[in-house]
Image: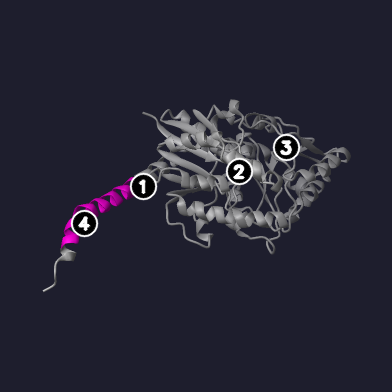
Amino acid sequence: MKKEIVFVERVPSIVNLKFARALKLTGKYKTTLISFSKVDENLYKKAFDKILIFELEHKIHPKKIIQFFKKISSKEARIFLKKIRKLNPYVFHITGPDLFTMIFMFLIKKERPKIYFAYDIWEFSTGTTGGFRMKKIFQKIFEKISFKKAHGVLHKGPSGELNFLRYKIGVPDLAITPDCLDEWIYPPKRGKRKKELHVIYPGGPLTSEEGRIPFIKIVKTVTSQKIHFHTYGPCVQEKDNNLFFNEEKINKYFHFHKREKPEELNKKISKYNYGIFPDFYDATIINPIWPKTSMAGKMFNYIEAGLPTIINRQSEVMSDIVKENKIGILIDYSDLKNLKKIIQQQNYEKLQQNVKKAQEKFRLSKNIKKLEDFYKKIVNLKHQKNKIIFSYNYLIYFFYPYLLIFSLMPLR
């Protein structure tokens, strides 16, 4: 009989889709997704046998507060909760931090193993702008509660990163990388155009905030060297879109593409020369633990797409992967103005050969056993704990009458 893994997310992530797909393909698991937002069912049905959705607006505007409470007290909500309480899976895989997924921790049966996947650790967050600062306060609260309620913790950063928290995590943890989904791997392409260089960031331009070099400044520095710079998707903050639309009009080396479907993205970007991480920080302002421990799923987009990576040395956990596997170029912000010269000094064919080796090393079908073993470990520990609690309760129940009689006996 297949074991059921229930994934819980506010907005389903590609990382969990990859995990679920790899687990499903082993033939040993039934995968279920619980989401608080719409999903692309054509994509997610490849990874999940069952999908339960209850749409909830995350940003509760004062004008919509009545509508929100009507939604959570509706018949639809009661049916959704009834379905949740009937679930009795092998393990719950709950991603956060998030208000809805944190609340979910309290809704499911106590005896079921709960694994918290700390997608990002907000305790290390660098956000300093007003709105972001307020969000950070709440996220850190949700995060701490989620850590405390879990029977095991997954995280994308390096082993030992949880030791940087200001509180202890008293359960087992596993540092796990997103890795490469087999069907999304494209071997490095030979004979790419050498006259013009193209670098790609497979997401929208990042938000400008205190302590981070503005994305637009990085774009201008790179494209001033006649290197084509491509992004895919809208800006993280909608208000920034016009800035980049205008940049595309006046800068023939900047290309502001629309977002691509996840299953098609790697094929699209595989035609470029390099993947780039345009993240550079002022370590005197931000929390230095953030770049030290951050692991972006895009790291494995580049490997899947057969692209060498250009990355800031400050991003330690990712730059270590690049360095150890010899799949790219490590730079400092001061190197950015000379990026073209640095690229021209590389043995590109050798980098491609190393990327091909990395594709095999990080192939998820080979590495999914790490996650399976962690699930098994947490389930076994939870069962042992349940047995101890049961034995304790049984002893109390059995000896209670004798203890009561003994307590009522007169002392001589």
Give the numbered dot on residue 382: 1
Residue identified by numbered label 4:
400
Cα separation between marks 4 and 1 = 27 Å
Q: Quadrant of the N terminus?
A: top left
Residue 360 shows in this picture: no
Residue type marked 1: Lys
The answer to whether 225 is drawn above or below residue 123 in the figure is above
The answer to whether 109 is drawn above or below residue 137 in the figure is above
Number of numbered discs: 4
Residue at the spot x=14%, y=70% of the render?
410
* Image location of residue 249, percent across then percent down: 87, 38
Residue identified by numbered label 2:
69
Residue type marked 4: Tyr
Q: Which stretch appears magenta?
A: 383-405
Cα separation between marks 4 and 2 = 46 Å
Residue identified by numbered label 3:
233
> As rendered, which of 391 and 69 lies closer to the eye?
69
**In contact (CB < 8 Å): disc 3 and disc 1:** no
Residue type marked 3: Gly
Cα separation between marks 2 and 1 = 35 Å
Secondary structure under tag 2 reads helix
Residue at the spot x=72%, y=31% of the render?
192
Sequence order check: which comes first, mark 4 or mark 3?
3
Identify the residue at the far right of this view: 250
* Image location of residue 384, percent across then percent down: 31, 48
Residue at the spot x=43%, y=57% of the render?
170
Cα separation between marks 3 and 2 = 33 Å
Relative horizontal placement of residue 312, taking residue 182 as reference (left or right):
right
